[in-house]
Image: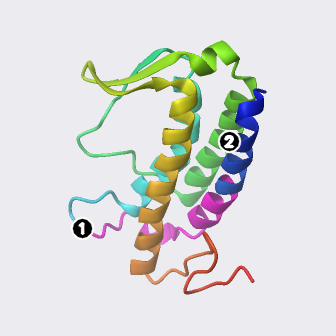
Amino acid sequence: MLPDFEPLLAEFREEAATTKRVLERVPEDKLSWKPHAKSMSLGQLALHIAAVPRNLAKGLQQETVEARFSPTGPTQPASVQEIMDTFETGVRDMEACIQNMSPDSAKGSWRLLAEGKPIINRTRAGVLRSVVCNHIYHHRGQLSVYLRLLDVPVPVIYGRSADESSI
């Protein structure tokens, strides 16, 4: 593994444990719930978060990826178990991706396109930071709001939540 990636891998593992705690709180009977008509459902959002590591680990093996956006949004999961299985697989795939990335591959350009137009054009190392970490944190924050709106106790993410303390 590249020495520069050791802190990134450590952060990914720590944040994956936090993300898992949040995903575990998703209530099975509320997967189709939406806070607003334009929002993703709870299940869609949770599955999107769970799938990011796996999808990116696969996508980083290529130089260019064409995004496929569905007009109805991300896939609706059948169960919380599907979300958790997807996340566990993705975490393993992303850990392997980070550990096995060569210096040349890390410095190499990577592009995400939508209908042939660039959305992201960065080095693979830059994509790891912006998508694997920041993108997941962003959506995890959304998910914690969904949980709060459903009166589901929000786990500790950083420090304390109104429902739990890390102390």
Report which quarter residue 98 is drawn in.
top right
| Helix, strand or loop for disc 1 | loop
Q: Is residue 153 left or right of residue 18?
A: left
The answer to whether 18 is drawn above or below residue 162 in the figure is: above
Residue 18 shown in magenta: yes
Q: What span is colored magenta in the figure? A: 16-35
Which residue occupies the foreground of this view, 116 or 50? Answer: 116
| Helix, strand or loop for disc 2 | helix
The residue pinned by badge 1 equals 36
Report which quarter residue 31 is drawn in.
bottom left
Return the mark for residue 8.
2
At label 1, which amino acid type do we have?
A: His
Return the mark for residue 94.
none
Of badges 2 and 1, the one in the foreground is 2
Which colouring convention does the figure follow? Answer: rainbow
C-alpha distance separating marks 2 and 1: 35 Å
At label 2, which amino acid type do we have?
A: Leu
Residue at 55% x, 25% y: name it.
124
Residue at 39% x, 45% y: name it.
75
Q: Residue furthest front?
A: 4
Residue 77 shown in magenta: no
- Give the number of marks: 2
Residue 1: image x %, image y %? Answer: 78, 27
